[in-house]
Amino acid sequence: MPEPIPDLTMNRHPGELNDPQQRHLRVTCQYIDKLLSDVEHVLHAATSPSPFPRYVVDITPAQTRAIEDHIRRLRSQLLRTLAWQHMRPNSPEIPATRAVMTDLAFVDIAVEELKPGYMRGYGAVPEDAVSELNGVVYELRSLVAGMERYVRQELGTNLEARLRKLEETGCDVDLLRLMEQIVTRQGLVEFRSRIDSLASRLEDNDLEVALFGRVSSGKSSLLNALLGTDVLPVGINPITAVPTKLRYGTSLRGAVTYGDGRNEIVKVEDLPGLVTEQENPGNLRNVVRVVVEVPSPRLRHGIVLVDTPGLGSLARRGGAETLAYLPTCDLALLLIDAGATFNDEDIGTLRLLYEAGIPAIVLLSKADLLGEGDLHQVVGYIQKQLQHELGLEMNVHPVSSLSSHSILLDYFFERELLPRFDQARSLRNGSVARKIGTLRDSVIAALETNLDRKKRGGHNLPTDAQGLEERLRHVTGMIGEQRTTLNYAFLKLAESPEAVLSQVADTALRWMRTHSKARVTSFQLSEWIHDAVRQDLERSIGSVGWVSRRAIDTLLSVAQEMGRTDVPAQDDLEILLRDMPRFELAALPKDIDTSHWMFLGDSLVRAKIRNSLRQSIGELLQQELHLYGRALSQWNQQFASKMEFLVNSYADAYRVQLHRIAGTSKDAIDAPQLEDDLARLKNWEAGESSEVMQKL
Ligand SMILES: Nc1nc2c(ncn2[C@@H]2O[C@H](COP(=O)(O)OP(=O)(O)OP(=O)(O)O)[C@@H](O)[C@H]2O)c(=O)[nH]1
Ligand SMILES: [Mg+2]
């Protein structure tokens, strides 16, 4: 027997419905209102900009108004119905942005399902259509992504606010702000992302100045002395194990990033546990980045000083970290120890810096150890050697971290480092200023095309507009596919410790045979494991670099045919490839004694080596590769998005211009405003912008 419905009307006022009944009433009114909204939507079909009309419009404007009156009356009756039960419509709870984002997410899924892989369900996709189909998908996705960014306020009002903030910090961003306003007013959305990325370049004002030198040459001590702190651990044995960045902050604290992508804020007392050879030997804890905030006025202007693990024959694994970091710094200080003899290792480091195109300053550290006369002689000797070995005419600046000699360090900082830092900064700012200039040219070109279309209708179509569009589509598709390609490569690396072991076994065997040695040390094995992983990675990264460079080349040639000056630069790509996580094995494999295997055949020895490796390190390698794979795919998310953003921000702008010239674009045009905006941009004085980025 069904349960009796409980009587909920016990405590009711006269004429009042019970709770479920009231709820039903409210829901029904809401539902009716939603249906009325649908009717409104139908009524406005005639004026909708949608290219996929659903309704044949058989209602005249006068009839539309009459129907709207009816709807209004129905709605006010709905309100009265609720009021009868002392109810009002609920206040809204869903932010409009969230609703839009949800819809966009569905749009994105729908677009994704146009890819050749999904399309195959409807029959084989012709080979010659695959690449363009991918292009079609990524073109649409890049537009969806742009809209999402806008809704999430990364762009939109936020961009305006960011530019205002830059202005407050002393940055002259007038031209960029003017362009932001014009682009918004004229609906040139395709330029927003480029303005956005130029703003990011201005915001990221840090320049990294790194100290390099052999183990114990006094790098950490010098940084401590320079900043009046003792946060960096120092000592006689190899100390620093992980590159450590020091940047300005109002209080002393550190932030650490691990290889698996974890971030952690740490107290400075805990730093030695993370950055020293003694407490974190060979970087067992797999720290990939340490940033310490120090409240030193010397860091105020955006200098980031970087302490690196020592190089040379005494270096531990940290040396490899230093070499990996080296190409990414903006300015280098090479320390030569006055207490040791100047040797080839110092020259080697300087040569590396030179080859990487990084400006370097040579310092003679621990100058307090030498008397005036000796100092002079040593400085002269080193300068002569540099000239002789590298053909470089360089000054050598004596410094010391002892407080009794602080005058040397102060002099160096104020007279040498700061001017060089400013010089490096103005080089970088100059490149941003040039980019702002070319952006101005292309906004002008877009405005002119619009004005031209208004006056004369479309013309001036480049001879092969369709061919250009196809090339752009191809580029977009290629770049879009890279995320998947890289993820697949990373996954394969992460899940194949056996392949790594096999390669190491091959190397070990070759080494044994050529050197007739009966023992392979754990240190060698560890190096070879790292080499194997690095080589695997270089292959996938190499192919991505190749595809990316080709994409940029295509953009360059399309831009040239369209007579555009706004083009991406190859070095934008190199910047993106920075910061890829590095692989670190947390322990050494065991030495392998091969003396009993000397007379066995190659394949047997290879199998034995592999077996021994598997036993000593197999499980750990498997775990670490797995973690590393995760860190790599996190990195890839960032890299791929930035790469897509870079390529599409240009491809979009070219595409829109092609449409505009062809007259297929549907933008509404307000001619007087357009002429006014165009004149303001054109008359922008070069002088006004030449000082654009002088922040200091
Ligand atoms: N006399 C003298 N000794 C110094 C000076 N700077 C550093 N030292 C000593 O040199 C040794 C090494 O100093 P660190 O600052 O740890 O050297 P580092 O280059 O950071 O060494 P790693 O991190 O191991 O590469 C320590 O014993 C310091 O006391 C200096 O200016 N004068
Ligand atoms: Mg050190």
Image (spheres, rainbow, N blue to C red):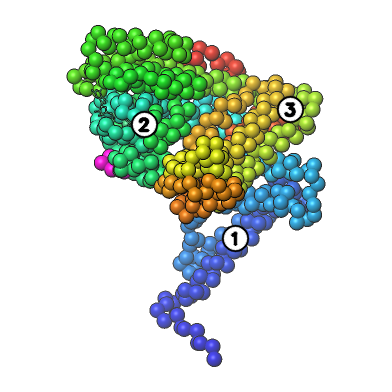
In the rendered structure, find residue 374 and report the number of the disc placed on it: none
Q: Residue 248 magenta-drawn?
A: no
User: On the picture, is 95 further left or further right than 32?
Assistant: left
Residue 644 visible in the current orientation: no
On-image quarter of the N terminus = bottom right
Give the main secondary structure, helix, strand or loop, of the magenta stretch.
Answer: helix
Look at label 2 and name its amino acid: Leu
Q: Where is residue 416 in the image (x, y as percent from the top left)?
A: 35, 14
Q: Position of residue 262 (x, y in %)?
A: 42, 47
Is disc 1 surrounded by few (<14), some (14 to 19) or many (20+) residues within 10 Å? some
- Which is closer to the viewer, label 1 or label 3? 3
Mark 2 or 1, nearer chain start:
1
Dot 3: element? helix
Look at label 3 and name its amino acid: Ile
Residue 341, above or below 328: above
Mark 2 or 3, nearer chain start:
2
Is disc 3 surrounded by few (<14), some (14 to 19) or many (20+) residues within 10 Å? many
Residue 608, above or below 16: above
User: On the picture, is 227 further left or further right than 562?
Assistant: left
Dot 1: element? helix
Q: Name the residue under label 3.
A: 661
Residue 655, above or below 600: above
Look at label 1 and name its amino acid: Asp
Q: Which residue lies furthest to the bottom in this view?
A: 1
In the rendered structure, find residue 33 and report the number of the disc placed on it: 1
Q: Is mark 2 in CB contact (under 8 Å) with mark 3?
A: no
- Dividing the image into four quarters, tell me where ligand 2 lies: top left
Q: What stretch is highlighted in magenta?
A: 266-270
Quarter where residue 314 is shown: top left
Q: Mark 2 points at which residue?
A: 314
Is disc 2 surrounded by few (<14), some (14 to 19) or many (20+) residues within 10 Å? few
> Label 1 CB, ligand 2: below 8 Å?
no
